[in-house]
Image (tube, coloured by chain):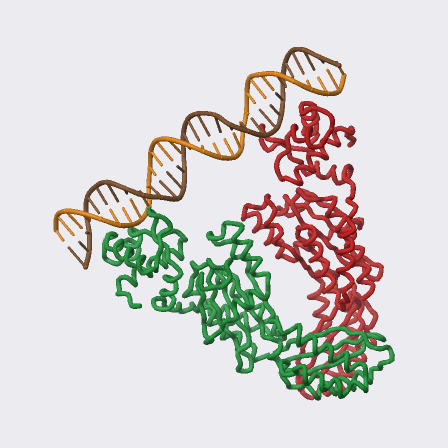
Chain colours: A red, B green, C orange, D brown
Amino acid sequence: MELDARKRKVLEAIIIDYIATAEPVGSRTIARKYDLGVSPATVRNEMADLEELGFIEQPHTSAGRVPSDAGYRYYVDCIMERTVLAKEAKSLIEQSYQTKMKQIEELIQLSLKILSSMTSYTSLVVAPHFGKSTLQLIQLMQVEPGKALIIIVTNGGRIENRIIDIPEAVTKTDLEIVSAVLNEKFKGIAVKDWDKIILKAVQSQLLGQHKVFSLALEFLDSLLCDETEDKVYLSGALNILNQPEFKDISKVKNILELLENEDVVSSMLKDEGQGGIQVKIGTENKHDSIKECSIITATYKLDGKTFGTIGLLGPTRMQYAQAMSILEFLTENLSISLKRL
Amino acid sequence: MELDARKRKVLEAIIIDYIATAEPVGSRTIARKYDLGVSPATVRNEMADLEELGFIEQPHTSAGRVPSDAGYRYYVDCIMERTVLAKEAKSLIEQSYQTKMKQIEELIQLSLKILSSMTSYTSLVVAPHFGKSTLQLIQLMQVEPGKALIIIVTNGGRIENRIIDIPEAVTKTDLEIVSAVLNEKFKGIAVKDWDKIILKAVQSQLLGQHKVFSLALEFLDSLLCDETEDKVYLSGALNILNQPEFKDISKVKNILELLENEDVVSSMLKDEGQGGIQVKIGTENKHDSIKECSIITATYKLDGKTFGTIGLLGPTRMQYAQAMSILEFLTENLSISLKRL
DNA sequence: TGTTAGCACTCTCCTTAGTTGAGTGCTAAT
DNA sequence: ATTAGCACTCAACTAAGGAGAGTGCTAACA
């Protein structure tokens, strides 16, 4: 759909003003504040056209106009120019990533904090499927007679552990043998590729030797089941409370409840499609409680492969240009930092 | 302070009714619903006395009465009888603890979920000071050349780990030697007793032998510093949104922000004093944002010693009797389950 | 033909005034 | 000591009357 230059300018003005004020925008305001060099009457005519095209709406007859979801969509796709981040903002992000971090989780948490504090929106991460990681180390050790600690380390510094009961007769040496065998079998292999068949095969092959093998394999198996779900992190959820559109407590409640449900958040973010920065505006979201929200998502990489999704949730009246720029720049930095781990 | 029987009955009726309805209670309601066998006029006289004593208040002249913090206090201390939990409630709790759990954290999270779902209040735990735990196992292992994983296990199944950089020259055997020495030095000792002096002593004693020692000790030292803070868990924070007294979004915001601050939550709960069940009502709380809330706390034990605090946060208009009973019963069960770990 | 001034019209928001009803405190009778 | 009766108070609701912002339409203008 092509709009002539003036209509674009009017639509842009309405959106920018509404994003800033959260108040319906009138023709006078536009004519004055955004010098289009035409009278309010002309603007009114343009507005009538824009309304017919579905880009703006009137809350009631005598109110100004408010952008519709379609309006925001057109703005994001065809009008908006990505903000060039101020040097200070860039160096703020870069410096935050300077601190040494040893765990992938810390990096993610840091990124979320930066994002939500810079944008005042809620930031979300759906962290990598455990299955995509490769195993770096698996080790069993005795904690006390009858109890062993089993620990695995994957690339990116993710660590999982559990204490398991073992027969009292099992010695440290036994545990070391088991560790050695498991390491040999699984090291360097992506967790998702330990599929049940391999696990079973190893299990039957080794079952005769030690009960411990089967317990360890049980743990690995449970990881496969439990950790098939993505892990969800979020930060700045309370920022929602600052938005005037959510002064109504029941809306807030619905959204916060949605955010507590990891599956839902995960499905909200994961719709990557192309990669790059994605924007979902208002009703483009599936879940009812966030039909007045927009979500901007980006993906980050580890070992060259797309790993997780990071997103920003705000009202449809969102600072798209700025938020997208920040998210883009931050995602780059995050990917670089992950590489260094 | 002694109240005569009828005043106590009137106060109790007011509190029970207000807890149930969140509406100011009038004399007529009391005379009718809670059969005291007297007329509203008599009740009015009693109410005037109770108001003078500071146990109830009038929001405005022509409204009914509302309990004051002092009123709740008197109710909790002198009038209320602890609810006897229904069998179903008890067995619900007991059954929840039947599932096998291997980590102290899982148990805590479970307890919180039970609490907040049974009471509809927000439940909180301030988890044991790391320093109180004793070390069960410390182990270093190589992840890849130049990187080692250091892991410690304390009683109660708490596990901490970190990946540290080590000189490439360090071999697996070196790491095992270091592990062995550290185990020997620290095993069975409470973390808080690894004070800096001992750490330093060990450090200077061993520094000559391996760089790894000093790195490992650095980790232990950082645990001492970082983990002096208590760990805070919470569940059901959104339950606050259901209370009519918090329909005002700014109050909710203040409270939720308070709950995000771990130090504050920790200071809110830790005021154990005697042990047993403690109640802090309204303005008895130090923090302004929860001056309209009450907190019920209890402590749970591990190895016979008081370990952590578990609490319930709700409006001052709280189901004290029921909440206290649930909390008490659950705390017992939690302590028993911890023993089994 | 596109732009603009003018104007009547609409509709929300705010204020004011009146009404209702719950609940009190006081007084006098029991 | 208790209670019935009554006048009084005050929040909450309703209705009515501006005020103001903004529109759409028409007619004049470049």
Residue A64, quarter of the rendered image: top right
The single residue placed furthest to the right in the displayed view is B169
Left-right relation of B49 to A38: left
Rendered-image quadrant of the C terminus of chain B: bottom right
Q: Is the N terminus of chain B in the top left, top right, bottom left or bottom right quadrant?
A: bottom left
Closer to us: D27 or B120: D27
Does residue B36 show up?
yes
Residue B106, quarter of picture: bottom right
Expressed as whole percent of the image width and height from the top left, the position of residue B238 reads 55, 56
- The location of residue B165, given as percent across then percent down, is 81, 74
In the rendering, at what x and y percent does residue B196 appear? 67, 81
Q: How many marks?
A: 0
Viewer can see residue A203: no
The correct choice, above or below, for A148 with respect to A106 in the image is below
Q: Looking at the image, which is closer to me, C1 or B57?
A: B57
The correct choice, above or below, for A40 with respect to A95 in the image is: above
> Which residue is at 44% across, 69% downward?
B325
Q: Residue at x 56, y 61 (%)?
A: B259
Quadrant for residue A145, please give it. Answer: bottom right
